[in-house]
Image (cartoon, helix red, strand yellow):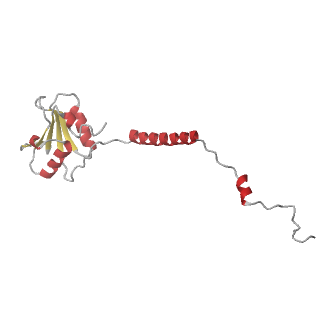
Amino acid sequence: MTRGKSLRSGRRRSTSREKSKQMPTLAIKPSVIAIWALVFINSVLIISSAHKLFKRSVDVQITPSKQTLTIEVQNGCGISGIANRISSNLSYLNYQVVGKGNADHWNYDHSILIDLTGDKDAAVERLRKDLGIDKEDLYLTKEQTGADVRLIIGKDYQSLKIYNALQ
């Protein structure tokens, strides 16, 4: 045996420089990055579109007061089915609709809200704001019906917040 040499002379130690040369390098082309970016963006768009498609949208934030109102909806504009649509939207938003039909005439330019009892001022005011009806179009009259409030839908029905509450 010679001095300085070991018995394991058949093996050679590799240096760190040689190890780095042995490891494969990642050669990512810009086109591959662009494709993956597009896949990611498309996935996000598809998921958000599907979420919007399957979610029942409510464009306005209407939260009825804790004090329940019974509402009678009347068509005062002459557009067929408008009382049904507004009634459905009110019901969906947890308002209690007890009647719907036609008003005494179809020449109402503005939608009006009629307080029939006079004893639920806070709830009526909240409903007025939720519908988007001006204060000038809120009336008070004492009338014995099965409703606390009567909503007469005028020719401005498309400006009511409740009109587009459901699509």
- Looking at the rendering, which quadrant does residue 35 occupy? top right
Q: Residue 92, image x and y in percent?
A: 28, 43
Residue visible at 92% across and 70% down in the picture: 2
Q: Is residue 9 visible?
A: yes
Q: Residue furthest front?
A: 3
20 and 96: which is toward the camera:
20
Q: Is residue 120 visible?
A: no
Residue visible at 12% across and 51% down in the picture: 121
Q: Residue 116, image x and y in percent?
A: 10, 44
71 and 15: which is toward the camera:
15
Q: Residue 68, image x and y in percent?
A: 19, 50
Residue visible at 23% across and 34% down in the picture: 84
Residue visible at 69% across and 50% down in the picture: 24
Query: Which part of the image, by quadrant, shows the C terminus?
Result: top left
- Looking at the rendering, which quadrant does residue 3 occupy? bottom right
- Looking at the rendering, which quadrant does residue 79 occupy? top left
